[in-house]
Image (cartoon, rainbow, N blue to C red):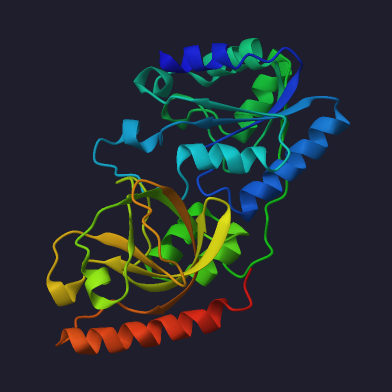
């Protein structure tokens, strides 16, 4: 029961109002919920808190589920904290937690997090087999001494503001749409690892980004990106795919950092995706590939010239 140890490590003494969920992506809908949570907590003189999960619950509930996370667990916590929430409690979702009744779980968060209220969406469910919906939670609250707060949904975009919408947009290469739902630029972070070093031979040395298998990677193609390295920002041309011209088997994320020439193997970088400029394609010759790469860099410089 690792979740119990997690709760004990994050014990809160002052009464709190909690939001509970996965919150992958921390998109505009989540941010709207957290802002409402903060204001409601202040009105009731409570701390605002978020209880989230270190791992995706679906990996425990479905052995065939493979997560495609928009944000890493570490980045997710940082993003939630940046909204002004008083505290964030990440816990481990395991089978024992999956089998816990809603009543038992509420008793735990009342004990360890001093929960006086929960802030949830209208389709929220809690407990083994999703036993408790909002109506049942409200009835439980009358008996157990907590209230249920149901904020209005965020509805300021043409498409549903959901993590699924972000994933679908990224998987189709529409990073602009994904960014509009997130309220920020989608990003990937990792360390620079050695690749095939073909880029250097072609005159476009690239930084190969390591990535987690559970991380959602945008559709294969060429992207205009902002590159963050040691607090300095550069423009980048990022290629995602298998380099079909050279018949590679494995997907890579390679970035040509414009106006940059330094060995950065082993260093950490962050890529922010601004726009996709074209699909991945196979070229008949290396010469035609080089010509296209020069055109890509010029186009990306134009896209990024006014973006800080």
Residue at the image position 56 percent from the left and 61 percent from the top: 233
Q: Is residue 217 visible?
A: yes
Give left or right: position of 265 versus 305.
Answer: left
Q: Nearer the viewer, residue 243 or 263?
A: 263
Question: Residue 89, image x and y in percent?
Answer: 58, 26
Q: State whether residue 139 is above or below residue 305.
A: above
Q: Nearer the viewer, residue 36 or 180?
A: 180
Question: Residue 15, image x and y in percent?
Answer: 76, 18
Question: Residue 25, image x and y in percent?
Answer: 52, 49
Residue at the image position 76 percent from the left and 15 percent from the top: 14
Q: Nearer the viewer, residue 258 or 270?
A: 258
Residue at the image position 72 percent from the left and 49 percent from the top: 152
Q: State whether residue 227 is above or below residue 112.
A: below
Give left or right: position of 280 versus 295.
Answer: left
Residue at the image position 36 percent from the left and 85 percent from the top: 294
Q: Is residue 161 visible?
A: no
Give the total number of marks visible in the rendering. Answer: 0
Task: Locate the N terminus by quadrant.
Answer: top left
């Amino acid at each position: 029961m690792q979740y119990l140890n997690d709760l004990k490590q994050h014990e809160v003494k002052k009464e709190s109002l909690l939001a509970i969920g996965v919150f992958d992506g921390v998109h505009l809908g989540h941010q709207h919920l957290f802002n409402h949570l903060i204001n409601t907590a202040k009105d009731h003189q409570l701390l605002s808190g978020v209880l989230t999960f270190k791992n995706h619950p679906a990996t425990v509930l479905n052995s065939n589920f493979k997560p495609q996370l928009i944000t890493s667990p570490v980045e997710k916590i940082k993003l939630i904290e940046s909204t002004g929430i008083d505290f964030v409690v990440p816990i481990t979702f395991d089978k024992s937690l999956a089998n816990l009744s809603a009543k038992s779980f509420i008793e735990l968060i009342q004990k360890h997090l001093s929960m006086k209220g929960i802030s949830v969406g209208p389709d929220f469910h809690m407990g083994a087999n999703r036993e408790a919906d909002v109506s049942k939670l409200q009835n439980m609250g009358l008996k157990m001494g907590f209230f249920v707060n149901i904020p209005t949904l965020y509805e300021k975009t043409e498409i549903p503001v959901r993590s699924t919408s972000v994933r679908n947009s990224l998987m189709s290469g529409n990073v602009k749409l994904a960014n509009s739902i997130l309220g920020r630029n989608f990003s990937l972070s990792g360390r620079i690892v050695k690749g095939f070093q073909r880029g250097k031979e072609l005159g476009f040395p690239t930084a190969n980004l390591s990535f987690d298998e559970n991380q959602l990677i945008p559709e294969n193609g060429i992207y205009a990106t902002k590159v963050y390295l040691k607090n300095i920002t550069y423009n980048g041309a990022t290629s995602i795919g298998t380099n079909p011209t050279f018949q590679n088997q494995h997907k890579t994320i390679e970035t040509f950092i414009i106006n940059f020439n330094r060995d950065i193997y082993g260093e950490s970088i962050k890529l922010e995706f601004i726009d996709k400029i074209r699909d991945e394609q196979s070229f008949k010759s290396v010469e035609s590939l080089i010509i296209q790469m020069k055109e890509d860099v010029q186009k990306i410089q134009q896209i990024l010239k006014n973006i800080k």
